[in-house]
Image (cartoon, rainbow, N blue to C red):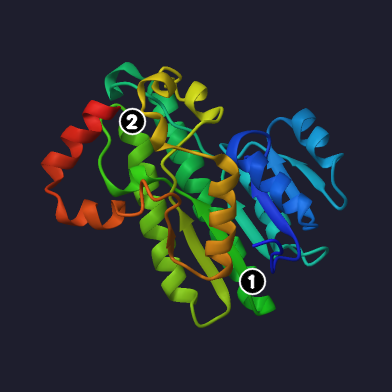
Amino acid sequence: MSTFPFRRALITGASAGIGERFAHILGQAGVPCVVVARRGDRLRELADRYTGFEVLEADLQSESGVAIVAERVASAANPVDLLVNNAGFGSSGPLHESAVERATGQIDLNVKALVALTHGAVVAFRSRGGGYILNVSSVASFLASPNMAVYAATKSFVTSFTEAVHEENRTFGVNASALCPGFVATEFQAVSGGADRVSRTPRFLWLDADKVVRVGLEGVAKNRAIVVPGWQYASMPTVSKLTPRLVLRRIAGKIL
């Protein structure tokens, strides 16, 4: 898809990784973007490259940060019609070895902030007659993941939540999609403590970030409830339903 139906997008977690690639691909397609993250310097460098970009510094692990972004989503001045809920992080290792604040912080960012912004977008988009919501989840949402227990659980919530929002709004012009990629080589691996996973994971399982982004944008434009990029992972939703959960979590434990 060389052109997109979006008039203006808001992207959380836009300073790095998949979020940054969303900003570049939309910017190159001429779609103005509101780029959101804590690191304002990186956002400004990004915004300087494209026309119509707006920088919004906010910490989505705080209530005040979520409120700032929710207000921008609802704003009638230069309204956005695409919300990309990309901000999130994970932790690698057994739960008991993680600080509890890091575990609960994942819930604050991956779940609470996403729900609040999705709620604001649905209210605003329905009042305007339509819009698009793309929530970045993961193939980890289809199975329990030992050594990434909280992250996988938050993504299971995101996928289930987005499916429900999709169904609630399918006749109201509001498209809601969950983007569920597998391994993507970005800053995420270093932040989650899984940098060594890059060398241990077979090369064919890694996805190109730009392709993931394009598949996600095409999926939400076509109102697909769940979007799984890559032939490597296309069967994951079906396999996760047909395979005993004991087998799935043992396999996930070996990989992670």
Q: Quadrant of the C terminus?
A: top left
Q: Quadrant of the N terminus?
A: bottom right
Whole-percent x, y for residue 213 in the image? 58, 49
Amino acid, disc 1? Phe
> How busy is the neighbourhood of tag 1: few (under 14 within 10 Å), some, or many (20 plus)?
many
Residue located 34% across and 47% down the image: 141
Along the horizontal axis of the image, is 113 left or right of 201? right
Residue 64 visible (yes or no):
no
The residue at 44%/26% (across/down) is: 102
Residue 197 located left or right of residue 125? left
Residue hosting label 2: 148
Query: Label 1 to label 2, Cα distance in Å?
Result: 34 Å
- Residue 218 horizontal side relative to residue 40, left or right: left
Kindly tell me whether residue 44 is visible in this rendering: yes
Q: Quadrant of residue 225?
A: bottom left
Question: Residue visible at 19% across and 37% down?
Answer: 249
Residue 91 location in percent, x, y? 41, 26
Q: Residues within 10 Å of mark 2 (few under 14, many from 20)?
A: many
Quarter of the image where one finds residue 78: bottom right
Residue at (48% x, 47% y) in the render = 112
Above or below, 110 against 220 in this view is above
Q: Which of the pair 240/174 is nearer the observer? A: 240
Q: Amino acid at mark 2?
A: Met
Check disc 1 and report the residue beneath it: 125
**Where is residue 9 shown, x and y percent of the image?**
71, 57
Query: Which residue is nearer to you in this view: 202 or 49?
Result: 202
